Image: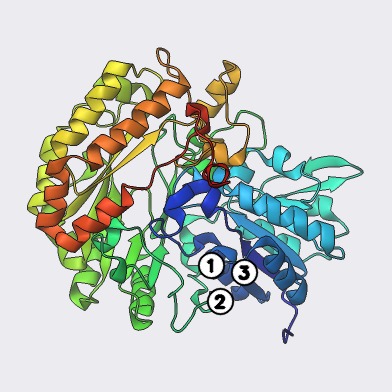
Amino acid sequence: MLYERRPDVLFVHADSSVLSYQGLSARFAAIEPPTWCLLLAQSCRSVGFGAMILDCAAEGLDIDEAVERICEIRPRLVCFVVYGQNPNSGTTNMSGATLLCRRLKEVSNGAKTCFVGSHTNALPNEVLGLDYVDFVLLNEGVYALRNLLKTDLENYLDKVRGIGFKKYGRNILNEPEYVVPQERMDIDLPGYAWDLLPYKSKPLDLYRSHFWHADFDHTKRTPFAAIYTSLGCRFRCEFCMINILNRMDNRLHITAADSPQMRFWSPDFIIREFEKLAGMGVETIRISDEMFFLDKRYYKPLVEMLEERDLGLRLWAYARVDTVRSEYLKHFKNAGINWLAIGVESANKQVRHEVSKGSFKDTNIYDVINMIRDADINVISNFIFGLPEDTIQTMRETLDLALELNTEMANMYPCIALPGSRLYHTAKKRHWALPESYEGYGFLSYECQPLPTKYVSAKEVLSIRDKAWNEYFNNPAYLELVERKFGVKQRRNVEEMKKIRLRRKILGDVPLKCEAE
């Protein structure tokens, strides 16, 4: 295949789905548009650089097929964009990206490679130290990438702010560039390069939503899109690494908690993205902001515009338990927000308080959940098993709370020390065992390696988490709720999902492929 113009940069989204999700990857896991590929591509195009996107996950490309495609395109720079909509995914997705990049370097003639993403920001020297990586972009990389593309990728690299590169066998991290400031968001991150994504017969039809987002109906999952209306978070939770993208300090031991800030696109700008997607026939859209339901200066006008336009969208968004405001819930529902994801984390206030810096410790979780349901909005409750102060008893309390709340969906995560979080640095300092592979940071992966608590081993934590998930989704009250709210077919779909058993190395399981052999 010949391309009319050699692009300045090819953004590559590698496929790590099987390693991350095991048997769930084939049908139940989402296939999300590569949000940061889209943002960076549009940003580059806005200042005159040629950009393309290769989404290996959406197209189902294996490593050799992806390498062949990259070699055909012959970009000046191959940029591996390694993020994920879940906090752990930026590290977990390094597995597919590194395998592909290594293979590319083996067979290509001088391809220049670059990494950007949350894991790269957390551990830039480690990523740059990989012998097949030529450059890293620091923080979100918007201005750093523009700076790099202005060069010949060979000379005067020490003058390029915001990058890391190799010189005489040494890693060099230049002074970081600024993140895009609030007043430049609409200008320097001017939307999404939707036209660069692959599709089969219509835009975004190779992407599918989370199973529950489509009300457990597989036919509603595609086409699918995900967008941000803001970037970052104002809080400093010990277990989270979201704000590592705001990093503007190369010193060791800098964590996400050192740069808690949010930046917003204007509501007028964002509504045009929703209208654009609706015009392409997309109805199912995720609002990926960590805290959409937080600052009413931004969400209120946007929600009102969505109400007025009545675009027929199925949306979901995140909220903190202590920021949900009852007077806005009916507007959320009218705007098409049918699901709210709520971080409950732990049933035990002390366990929760130790890692969330005082957040919502006195909030009545029952009242908040009921308030959301009264507005006819479904709830995804998120729980974490294995926080540092957790005991077997407190984790049982968390499961009991989940069963009592009986929300329309529940996510149950083992606590993992994610690179970029304060918890990661605590684990390193105290010599706690950390995953030995990228996929070990995946919540649902075979290699999953959670932290031990002060009282419970890592093995016990993962065993308790997996048993809790099974108890929740086998609970007759939950299955009856799904059938009552969504239908008999949807209940059967859930029952099919729960038949898929996760294998866990730490629990002594053999991987599925070995079992088949």
- Picture layout, residue 104 above or below residue 165: below
Q: Residue furthest right?
A: 168
Disc 2 to disc 1: CB gap under 8 Å: yes
Give the residue displayed 53% in from the left and 32% down from the top: 505
Q: Which residue is denoted by mark 1 in the rendering?
A: 38
Classify mark 3: residues with Cα within 10 Å, few (<14), some (14-19) or many (20+).
many
Horizontally, residue 54 falls left or right of residue 502, namely right
Q: CA distance from mark 2 to mark 3?
A: 9 Å
Q: Position of residue 261 (x, y in %)?
A: 44, 44
Q: Amino acid at mark 1?
A: Leu
Q: Position of residue 12 (x, y in %)?
A: 63, 63
User: Outermost residue, front direction?
Assistant: 517
Please tell me which residue is depicted at 56% across the width and 19% down the height of the picture: 432
Quadrant of the rendered image containing residue 49: bottom right
Viewer-side residue, 266 vs 1: 1
Q: Could you tell me how far apart the alpha carbons at marks 2 and 1 are, in whole angstroms?
A: 8 Å
User: In front here: 294 or 494?
Assistant: 494
Who comes first in sequence, dot 3 or dot 1?
1
Q: Specify the quadrant that holds the N terminus.
A: bottom right
Tell us which disc is closer to us: 2 or 3: 3
Q: Secondary structure at mark 2?
A: helix
Give the numbered dot on residue 4. Answer: none
Q: How far apart are the two marked residues, 3 and 1, measured between alpha carbons?
A: 11 Å
User: Type of residue at label 3?
Assistant: Leu
- What residue is shown with label 3? 54
